[in-house]
Amino acid sequence: MRKSLGKAAAIGTLSAMALVPAVATPATAYAVAATSPVSAQANPTLHFGDKGPAVTRLQQRLAALHYDPGTVDGQYGSQTRFAVWAFQKVQGMHPTQAAPVGTKTWAALAKPRTPKSIVKGGASNRAEVDLTHQLLFIYKGGRLTLISHISSGRAYYYYKGQKVNGRTPTGNYSVYRKAKGWETGPLGKLYKGNYFHGGYAIHGEPDVPLYPASHGCVRTPMHTADIVANLLPIGTRVYLRGHAPS
């Protein structure tokens, strides 16, 4: 969601209950997953809506690899699907809405491809937005801390009858303002916005599809937005590269 068009519009901040992530940062679960590698288990093909110990192993492994599957509860819900999408994209796969986790994905989870930084000489604390692959990477102290699926700006949208460029800008920026909860702008609501350029922000949104859908902002899943808000204090560098798919 882009908060403003040209001249910033006044916004009203709505109160919202703070969501406490079950995994403070995905790296926290590393020791758990490392002692129970997915390659040592009989792992069935999983589908959205499945439950059980195999889903728990999936969630633990994703968290160990710095993705955010949400609460590790053995239930394959929306947040786990977002994490599966992100993982599959990093591994060069092409995720689908159904997001099945089959033999290929389990094999990649056992021996994953390590994502490379898209910025040369970037700040040690930074956010990298890969528009081409619709991914967000956050680094703390030079170490990768979080990988998330995103949805960036669409090619264009209509506002008050006029066609407006909706693409997310590329470039080097810094977080200059943060919202504590929900905010309402002329184009709708956004959750815990981390503003990096004009009215553009990295923010939470319930709808984060597998294609660019925002008005220019970088959408993250709601649960991930709480983690992102803690990882991007004022002044954090934000680098945006690539070109969103049409």
Image: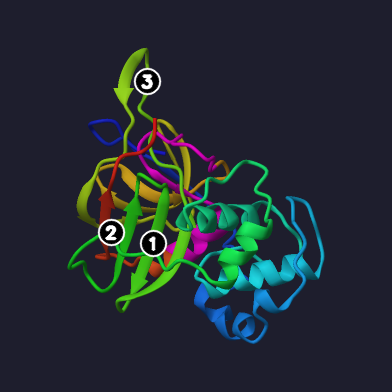
Q: What secondary structure is marked by label 3? A: strand
How would you rate the neighbour count of disc 3 (Cα within 10 Å): few for under 14, some for 14-19, many for 20 or more? few
Mark 2 — residue? 118
Q: In the current view of this chain or complex, which residue is farthest to the top?
A: 161
Relative vertical location of residue 6 with respect to residue 219 in this rendering, above or below: above
| Disc ID at residue 42 | none
Q: Give the quadrant of residue 9.
A: top left
Q: Secondary structure at mark 2?
A: loop
Residue on which disc 3 sits: 159
Q: Is residue 215 above or below residue 161?
A: below
Magenta-tinted stretch: 208-228
Q: Earlier in the sequence, mark 2 or mark 1?
A: 2
Q: Residue at x 66, y 67 (%)?
A: 59
Q: Which residue is mark 1?
A: 137
- Please tell me which residue lies in front, 242 or 205: 242
Left or right of 128, for residue 179: right
Query: Which mark is first along the chain, 1 or 3?
Result: 1
Q: Point out residue 92 in the picture as x, y percentages from the top left corner.
A: 47, 53
Residue type (three-letter) at the residue carrying disc 1: Phe
Q: Percent from the top left, x then y, of residue 31?
A: 58, 86
Q: Secondary structure at mark 1?
A: strand
Quarter occupied by the C terminus:
top left
Q: Residue at x 63, y 41 (%)?
A: 97
Question: Which residue type does callout 2 highlight?
Answer: Ile
Q: Position of residue 237 (x, y in %)?
A: 24, 62
Q: Is residue 3 above or below residue 228?
A: above
Q: Is residue 213 magenta?
A: yes
* Callout count: 3
Would you call the spot at circle 1 few (<14 residues within 10 Å), some (14-19), or many (20 or more)? many
As drawn, is 52 to the left or to the right of 115? right
Q: Is residue 73 visible?
A: no
Q: Position of residue 238 (x, y in %)?
A: 27, 58
